[in-house]
Amino acid sequence: MDSVVVDGDGELVARARLGDEAAFGELVVRYRRPAYTVSLSITGKHEDAEDVAQEAFLVALARLDECRNPDRFGGWFLTIARNRARNLVRRRSVRAVDELLFEVPARTPGPERQTELGELREALIRAMDHLTDVQREVLLLHDLEGWKHREIAERLDLPAGTVRSHLHFARKRLRTQLDRVHQPEEQLR
């Protein structure tokens, strides 16, 4: 059985600095979903997150020589994506949240189910507004992207225990916010 050699980030950055387009392409493949996820956690809009992720790659390519520790390219790059997303949000005075990506079943649900899903989506988005940026990023990278605590810690330059703590408190706050949505009106008075 042949083993596939996977270059580390440091090797890919070194090759990309020498003009190897395929090496930078591999970095793009490796980090496009995380960049999108981090951007989505800040912008709240699918289209904006895609634009920010793409812009972040262009900035990273132009500034590749500024990456002081190529082995930690992921953390450096996600910082660029995070800052670009924050800048976009700051530039907009009104922040309208469109949709959070959900897996859509092959069949279109009926009108009643579509209304239910729409309400759930809006409740989830509103609940996520109560999280800090870091909590949103950790939650989405872990629960949506399937990253392990260690991977998130390395990429966001945080201790693994801090990542676990952010994830715990993010889930707890989401549960609290979503429970409030589902309480009967009499209990809210």
Image (cartoon, grey):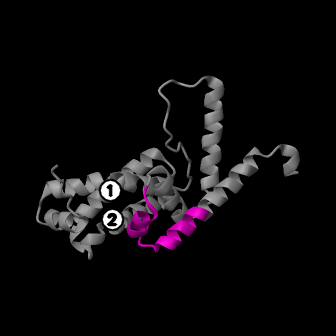
Three-letter amino acid code at the position of disc 1: Tyr
Residue drawn at 42 percent across, 51 percent down: 49
Q: Identify the secondary structure beneath mark 1.
A: helix
Location of residue 182 with respect to 139 vertically, above or below: above
Location of residue 12 with respect to 188 vertically, above or below: below
- In whole angstroms, how far apart are the C-alphas of marks 2 and 1? 7 Å
Direction from residue 187 to residue 66 in the image, left or right: left
Q: Is residue 164 magenta?
A: yes
Residue drawn at 25 percent across, 57 percent down: 27
Q: Is residue 52 visible?
A: no
Front residue (pair 175, 79): 175
Q: Position of residue 112 (x, y in %)?
A: 66, 26
Q: Is residue 77 magenta?
A: no
Q: Position of residue 137 (x, y in %)?
A: 49, 60
Range of the magenta residues? 147-168
Residue that carries the numbered disc 1 in the rendered image: 31
Residue that carries the numbered disc 2 in the rendered image: 74
Residue drawn at 27 percent across, 75 percent down: 69
